[in-house]
Image (cartoon, helix red, strand yellow):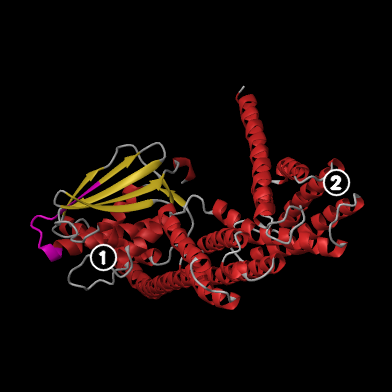
Amino acid sequence: MKDSLSAKTDHRRYLMHIILLALLYFVTGKLSIAVINNSYIITMGIFVPEGFAMAAVLIYGYRIWPGIFLGQFVLSLSEHVPLLPSLGIALSNSLEAIIVWHLFHAMRLNRSLSTLRDVMGLFAIILFAAQPFSAFFGTLFLQLASLLESNYWLSLFSWWFGNSMAQVLWTPMLLLLYAHRKEIRYTSLLGIVGLFGALIYALLFFTQIYSLPLLIAITMPIVIYITIFRDLLTGTILVVTMSVITMAAAYTHTGIFSVYNVSDNIINLNFYLLSHVLVVLVVGTLYHENSRTRERLQQLNLTLEEQVTAQVDTLREQQAIIAEQSKLASLGELLGMIAHQWRQPLNRINANIAVIDTLTGENPTIHEKIENVKKQTRYLSETIEDFSHFFHPDKKKLTFEPSKTVHKALMLIEPKEVGISFDIPDTPVYITSYENEYLQVLLSILHNMLENFKVHRTANPCIHIALTETTQEVILSLEDNGGGIKTEKIENIFDPFVTANVTGKNSGLGLYMARVLVHTSMKGTLKAQNQHNGVLFTITLPKGKQNNA
């Protein structure tokens, strides 16, 4: 039902466009012939309806051709042209419109006339395709009916020239008016057109100017100035306004148009208007196209500058990360060598302790001390092994318990005089990720907390560690009471070279690398927020499965 109503509405609108175009074509045609003081349908003067017809076709499509046909047919009959020639002329003008539409789209021209290519393409279609076609067949039909009042070639030229003038003058203005209809400031536009029209009227009707070059020298700079410093649409409207007043002056034989005969007056009028419209369209289009090009270049320069700055910042960050990773790799190699050198002495110590334990017999005090020595040597060996693995991550995903990794981090740091509290579920929780990188993130966070305690000289420092899980994620929270992080935006602490340590001893890369590891490598999130009397770090990662371990 809606489609049927829409189709009916479109059909009514289509018929209305045809009727309005036919009426406009007929009325402007009668006025054009009357103003030029020529009772014959062929005239060298500006035949205005051709400008409206071409603009209508380019705006509404070639299906508007029946409006042109009806308007031209009735106009020919009203000028006492017989039926058959009237039909032939109307048909040739309708075919001209269809040719114009197809050529315009084949050449991929823009009807907003935003470039010089669009303007010159439109001129080429008018001068070398549309008007040669209609002029040839129109004069041919009149000649076949023996209705030509002058020789064939003069009639052909007059038809071509008068219609071309109308299309060159009126069609660009109507296309620009349609393209910019939503952005026109009508009050200022009417003010400019009114002042300019008053000036032209005064020059033609109240001054004694009988020199065409002088008249052009007065009006041309004004039109060019307004076209450049306002817009192309205003310039074309001024030229059309000038054409209406100039045609009225030619009709009344006023001023410069009272000196010569009708033919010379028409030639002067056409030359005067043609010079203005060509300059306005060519110069105006070039100027505004050049302005748009400069704006695009400026925008491109700004964009390139932003991209270069972003790339430089990225390279700096990457270089910093590479440098930090290089340090870690070197430290890992050093720790690996230390672990290798320590392993033999530690093994000998354990062997000697075993011998001493055998020789001392059942002395409980000595046995207790020997067991303590064994425990310390094992701890020393495990510690150096943990550090060695930490600085050489294997980049292989494993399923592990984050609670155990937390205890491993605390064992590595050994936070003395810091209270540690836990809120960890009794049921094991698993993560499938890179455990060594997870450990590095925990160490960076814990290290920042311990440094914050020292900076703020926190009394009774404590860290609360909580582990929770959802259906998809595992969330580890670490919260301290170190007074929080003093910064305008706490998220900035994850930026490179930004340190929360006011002493400036840190490089500012620890938390940045932690964020990179969590977000990029482990595909999780790391957030921080000031809460109560401290800072809360939250690490969120996808869950793992126990059977993957």
Residue that badge 2 annotates = 85
Q: Position of residue 396 (x, y in %)?
A: 49, 57
Q: Are marks 1 and 2 in contact (CB under 8 Å)?
A: no
Tell me which segment is drawn in magenta: 454-465
Kindly identify which numbered label has been placed on residue 414: none
Task: Judge the density around disc 1: few (<14), some (14-19), many (≥20) Cα neighbours within 10 Å.
Answer: some
Q: Which quarter of the figure has residue 2?
A: top right
| Between marks 1 and 2 in the image, the one whose residue lies nearer the viewer | 2
Q: Is residue 519 magenta?
A: no
**Local SS, label 1:** helix
Q: Position of residue 283 (x, y in %)?
A: 57, 72
Q: Position of residue 420 (x, y in %)?
A: 19, 51
Q: Residue at x 15, y 61 (%)?
A: 453
Residue that badge 1 annotates = 356
Q: Is residue 24 left or right of residue 137?
A: left
Residue 349 in view, yes or no: yes
In this rendered view, identify the residue nearer to me: 106 or 409.
106
